[in-house]
Image: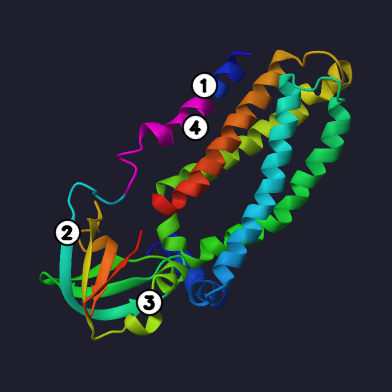
Amino acid sequence: MKKLSALSLLVTSLVALPVAAHHGWSRYDNDKPITLTGKVVEASYTYPHGTIKLDAAGKTWLAVLAPPSRMSARGLSSDDLKPGIQATVEGYPNRDDPAEMRAERITIGGKTTELR
Amino acid sequence: MSPGARLLDALEQGGIAQAMRDSMWLYPVVETVHIVGFIILVGAVILFDLRVLGLSKRVPVRMLAAHLLPWGAAALVLIVPAGLLMFSSDAGNLVGNRAFVLKMLLLMLAGANAAAFHMGSFRTAARWDQGVTAPVSARLHAAASLLLWIGIVTCGRMIAYA
C-alpha cells in the first residue's frame, strides 16, 4: 500500500514536470533573439525539419528551419534553399550549442517566410 | 565516437531513415499511422481505467478487459514500427530531447504499472467484476495509468517543441 502511494506520487510529479518546466523546457533561448545574414553553404529540405548551414558572424551556423510541408505551403521551395545563396535568419540560439539556432523566419532574395 | 553514438549514427544513415527525411509524404503518413495506433491503445487503456476507478460499474470488468485490452495490444503493431521509423530519421537529436527521454521513462513506468496490475489486483477481479467498487490497489493502478498515459501523450506532442 505504502509502495503504491509512493508510486502514484512519483507518477504525479513526473506528469506535472513538463508543466512546471514550461519556460526552461526549450533548448533555445527565447530571451536572446539573433539575426544572422550570410552565405548558405549547405541546405537540406528534409523531415522532421529542414536545416541550412550559414556562414555568418565569423562561424558556420546550423539553422533549424521547419518541416518541408510547411515551408512548401508558405512558398519556400527546395529550389529556393541552395548552397551559395544569401540568406537572413531571425531566431533563437541553442543554449548548449553556440553555433546552432532555431529560425523563426528566413529571408531569401527579399522574400521573408515565417517558419512557426 | 562512443558505441552508442555510432549505433545512432548508423541508424540515421540507413536507407529507411534517409527515405523518411527525403520523401515529401512518408514522414506525415508514418506519423499518422503512429497516431491512429495510439488513439486505439490509449483510448482502450483510459476507458478501462475509468471503469476500474468506478465509472459504469454495471459493465463487468473482466468482459471489458477481454474486449478492450487485446485491441490495445494489437495497436502496438501500428505504433511501434511507426515510432521506430520516426526515431531513425532523427535518432541523434531525439536521445538528447528531454520530452522524448521523459516519454520513454513514462512508457516504462506505464508498462510496469500495467504488469503489476495484471499480476496483482486484477487476479481477484472475479470478486469485484460488477456493481461493486474495485479494491484500493486496483484503483491506484488505474489512476496511475491514467496520469502516465496523459503524460506520455503530452511528452509525445512536446517532442516537436522541446
Looking at the image, is mark 1 or mark 2 earlier in the sequence?
Answer: 1
Q: Which residue is at 11% across, 69% downward? A: A57
Quadrant of the rendered image containing residue B140: top right
Q: Which residue is at 23% across, 84% downward? A: A85
SS of the residue at dot 4? helix
- What residue span does the magenta drawing correspond to? A10-26
Q: Quadrant of the N terminus of chain B?
A: bottom left
* Way the structure is coloured: rainbow
Q: Nearer the viewer, mark 4 or mark 1?
A: 4
Looking at the image, is mark 4 or mark 3 earlier in the sequence?
Answer: 4
Q: Residue A87: image x %, image y %?
A: 22, 76
Residue type (three-letter) at the residue carrying disc 4 = Val
Residue type (three-letter) at the residue carrying disc 1 = Leu
Q: Measure the alpha-carbon separation of dots 2 and 4.
A: 33 Å
**Mark 1 highlights which residue?**
A9
- Does the magenta segment cover residue A17? yes
Name the foreground residue: B116 vs B33: B33
Total marks placed: 4
Looking at the image, is mark 4 or mark 1 earlier in the sequence?
Answer: 1
Crowd band around label 3 with a 10 angstrom C-alpha radius: few (<14), some (14–19), many (20+): some
Residue A34's disc is 2
**Main secondary structure along the magenta-highlighted residues:** helix
**Disc 4, disc 1: CB below 8 Å?**
no
**Mark 3 highlights which residue?**
A44
- Does the magenta segment cover residue A91? no
Q: Nearer the viewer, mark 3 or mark 1?
A: 3
In this picture, is A1 found above or below A103? above
Q: Measure the alpha-carbon separation of dots 4 and 1.
A: 10 Å
Q: Measure the alpha-carbon separation of dots 3 and 1.
A: 44 Å
Q: Is residue A50 left or right of residue B111?
A: left
**Disc 4 and disc 1 on one polypeptide chain:** yes
